[in-house]
Amino acid sequence: MIQDDTIIALATPSGAGAIAVIRISGGHAIDIVSKHFKSVINKKLIEQKSHTIHLGHIIDGKKFLDQVLVSIFKNPHSYTGEDVVEISCHGSVYIQQQIIQLFLRNGCRMAAAGEFTMRAFLNGKMDLSQAEAVADLIASDSEAAHQIAMQQMRGGFSNEIKNLRQELLNFASLIELELDFSQEDVEFADRTQFNILLDKITQVLKGLIDSFALGNVIKNGIPIAIVGEPNVGKSTLLNAILNEERAIVSDIPGTTRDTVEDQIAIGGVNFRFIDTAGIRNTEDKIEQIGIARAYEKIEQAQLVIYLFEASEDKAAEIEALRNKYPDKNILLIANKIDTVKKDRARELKNSFKDLVLLSAKDGKGIEELKEKLLTLSNTGQMGKNDTIVTNNRHYDALLKALEAIHKVKEGMDMELSSDLMAIDIREALFHLGEITGSVSTDDLLGNIFSNFCIGK
């Protein structure tokens, strides 16, 4: 991506709307727009102050294309760190195309995907992890995903990494200094303090790595498989949770032969519910395929809802399921509670810990179920303002940094020479720097920003 030219793109979604915003960035942005902008009070755009808005018309020769509002942001106080002009025009697709084509003919080129944000990174307006958070913020579709993206975009994660890297860098410089005086056999770096720092870095990195499991499901939705025997009300339960007729409901056993999925936000967290085929022994080959897929979904799910009728004794089946999936978080739900007496309800509560009693048909107990799901989804960390990792690239870099720190720690324990330890320290610094962009390559940047939408 060339940095010294002027780029243009539509910043709002393509298609007709009330208003469209066209963004232009580069050293000649204001000059180019001023030649085709006529202010209603004859202002010269090139002479106006930064962060001002001006009403006028975009003109192509003698042809008036549209009445617009032009916003000016002068470098370095703009999103990209360059001169930026944003043109708010009427949302006609024809008008958008005419204005963009006018400026393409007069000194601009079309921006590549993510090029505005890439320029912001290259011009020091944000680091790489903050830039990636911009894409996450645009894609966020729940309160939790939005909260994480905002925390990262504001630099919470970046600052944590930068502070760790700086402390490690300070000791690394002392280790390197020792190499210059290797003939003197002196130590500039206090080994005791260095050990304390390594323990601190290890603890922080492990916490960030562990947070990825939570961050990943919040970003992509927490998958929950609804399983049980045929005709226990799995599809009815899915419809009750979603509050719509999403799955076909029938008294005929084996109605659901494939998985049915849908997503809903509960307490600001996205949950992806998967209604599966009823599990039973059957000779029906199609139903057998559906049951096999049900087991696949159990493997993939973070939470499993096992649904059974309140009137039936399913202790053996529940124990078998728990033995088969000992690492799975299984939530037991007794359905059709409206069909049994209170004594049976008390008996079930006494038999199974954290059991939810409900009637999917009447909607009774659905709110209790939602509260239980929030508790079991382990989203409590969200409320502590802790840093949560959601990016696969960050996760990989953290793993590699931790591995390098372990090597440094082993070197300390083995009393290795400074030159050998310096190699592992440099590796840890490299991987930490990858996260924020202190260390980057053209291929890495191209790969990251190509996933952005054009106009951002």
Image (cartoon, rainbow, N blue to C red):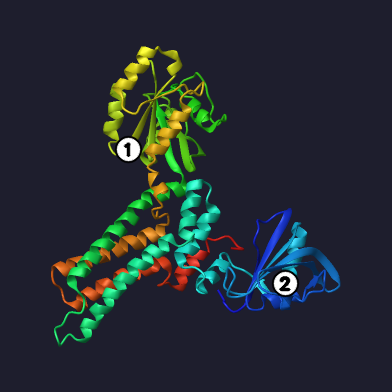
In the figure, 32 relative to 396: above or below?
Answer: below
The image quarter in which residue 298 lies: top left
* Image coords of residue 399 (percent x, y): 31, 60
In the figure, 284 relative to 296: above or below?
Answer: above
* Residue type for callout 1: Lys
Between 78 and 329, which is closer to the camera in this rendering? 78
Q: Residue at x 54, y 61 (%)?
A: 452
Q: Residue at x 46, y 66 (%)?
A: 128
Q: Alpha-carbon neighbours of circle 2 within 10 Å: few (<14), some, or many (≥20)?
A: many
Residue located farthest toward the right when viewing the structure as drawn:
62
The image quarter in which residue 305 lies: top left
Identify the secondary structure beneath mark 1: loop
Identify the secondary structure beneath mark 2: helix
Which comes before the other along the chain, label 1 or label 2?
A: 2
Q: Alpha-carbon neighbours of circle 1 within 10 Å: few (<14), some, or many (≥20)?
A: some
Residue 34 visible, this angle:
yes
* Residue type for callout 2: Phe
Marking on residue 103: 2
**CB-based contact (under 8 Å), mark 1 and mark 2:** no
Residue 106 visible, this angle:
no
Between 347 and 93, which is closer to the camera in this rendering? 347
* Image coords of residue 329 (percent x, y): 33, 36
In-image side of 3 versus 195 (left or right): right
Q: Residue at x 33, y 66 (%)?
A: 164
Q: CA distance from mark 1 to mark 2?
A: 58 Å
* Image coords of residue 355 (percent x, y): 36, 26
In the figure, 416 relative to 160: above or below?
Answer: below
Residue at mark 1: 328
Quarter of the picture holding the C terminus: bottom right
In-image side of 66 versus 112 (left or right): right
Quarter of the picture holding the N terminus: bottom right
Q: Residue at x 33, y 19 (%)?
A: 348
